[in-house]
Amino acid sequence: MTDIRSEDRSPWAVFLIFLRLGLSSFGGPVAHLGYFRAEFVARRRWLSERSYADLVALCQFLPGPASSQVGLALGLSRAGYAGALAAWAGFTLPSAVALILFALGVAGSGEALAPGALHGLKVVAVAVVAQAVWGMARNLCADAPRVSIMAIAACIVLLAPRAWTQVGVIAVAALAGLALFKPAAGDGHDPLPVAVGRRAGMASLALFFVLLLGLPLLARLVPDQGLALVDAFYRAGALVFGGGHVVLPLLQAEVVPPGWVDNEAFLAGYGAAQAVPGPLFTFAAFLGASMNGGPSGWAGGLLCLVAVFAPSFLLVVGALPFWEQLRRHRRTQAALAGVNAAVVGLLVAALYQPVWTSAILRPQDFALALVALVALVFWKLPPWLVVVACAGGGWLLGALA
């Protein structure tokens, strides 16, 4: 695929691109994948549609926040380790800073945005995800078997909404791809440049497991609240499948019973986290800043933020070099043909639940979503501009109601 943005290869350029996304990407992890596709596949052409779908499939298999892991992988492939850190910082820091400020009492109320504007941001997520589903389906579901896999995957995920369902669906789709598809020798390979060797990948995976097993032992031997926080948030980031909403009960069980954060503050922070862009895992920054005793404020917020995202960084760095090599084999390509169709099905399911059901509540919402979709697909307006316009439209509709 032709790269029309060769100047984007510096970590600073990667940071600025992801910072804009971090300031405007509302709507949750599925919407984030839509924003990433619009920015890096359709607009900047950093990678092909198939490579992007393969990357999304890998991150669906890994524990942790899938959208943040996709962002880390994009930064890593673009500008190495510094690029991965730049992508993570740009996408994560806007919401993390906002939530730390909220925890410190700088925010005046539990509403970070007017309710109408917040609803408008939910509506624009419908248009963003619909655009991503349509674009990916045209490229990845080009025949009846792939469309069938897509539809079956969507139905299963909607009827059995469990954290492990998505992983199971992708695994079965891989087996279906092996049975149904036989890529020709000349089909080629869409490379995803990876600036990580296999030795470094193995070291990263080894460090992931050393920390996962060693931190609980160290926290018992050394009675320090800072170390206990690192252990709790690292384990939460390492063991959760299904995204940010799944990690919330894990974090609540870690911080509320010991008295580190009272339950009222936990719920207030969760409400504020719904009103900021970027990954929901930045809720860890709010909790760290709200701690009773031990590290708190900015130090506590940043400590917990780094701890909850550290497993994602280690897993992405560890998995990518092996994943890129696996993608070159014809049997793997056959499996990925089924997996990519299933990924589109997962996005279709997410488009309905929770994106559509939480946003389209009345005819005015549908009209606003339709205008946003036309603006994105046919008028080719920048996504950030459509986001701002929908927030204003939601506020106006709320004021007129």
Image (spheres, helix red, strand yellow):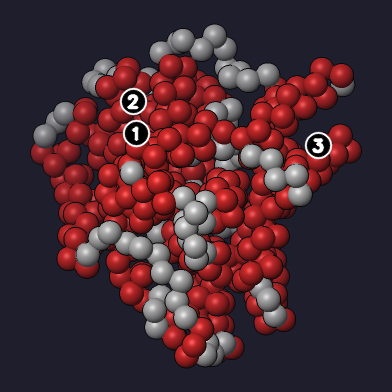
Percent position (x, y) of residue 50?
Answer: 53, 68
Q: Is residue 119 visible?
A: no
Question: Measured along the vertical axis of the image, is residue 74 above or below residue 51?
Answer: above
Q: In which quarter of the image is residue 59?
A: bottom left
Q: Is residue 345 left or right of residue 364?
A: left
SS class, disc 2: helix
Q: Is residue 81 left or right of residue 21?
A: left
Whether the residues at callouts 2 and 3 have beta carbons within 8 Å, the answer is: no
Whether the residues at callouts 1 and 2 have beta carbons within 8 Å, the answer is: yes
**In front: 213, or 306?**
306
Question: Measured along the vertical axis of the image, is residue 285 above or below residue 133?
Answer: above
Counting residues from the start of the chain, the first of labels 2 and 3 encountered is 2
Identity of the residue drawn at 83% across and 24% down: 397
| Residue on which disc 1 sits | 305
* Nearer to us: label 2 or label 3: 3
Q: What residue type is labelled 3?
A: Leu
Mark identifier at residue 301: 2
Q: Using a 10 Å C-alpha cutoff, classify the residue at mark 3 as few (fewer than 14 neighbours), some (14 to 19) or many (20 or more).
A: many
Whether the residues at callouts 3 and 1 have beta carbons within 8 Å, the answer is: no
| Residue on which disc 3 sits | 368
Q: Using a 10 Å C-alpha cutoff, classify the residue at mark 2 as few (fewer than 14 neighbours), some (14 to 19) or many (20 or more).
A: many
Q: How many labels does the image show?
A: 3
Identity of the residue drawn at 31% across and 28% down: 302
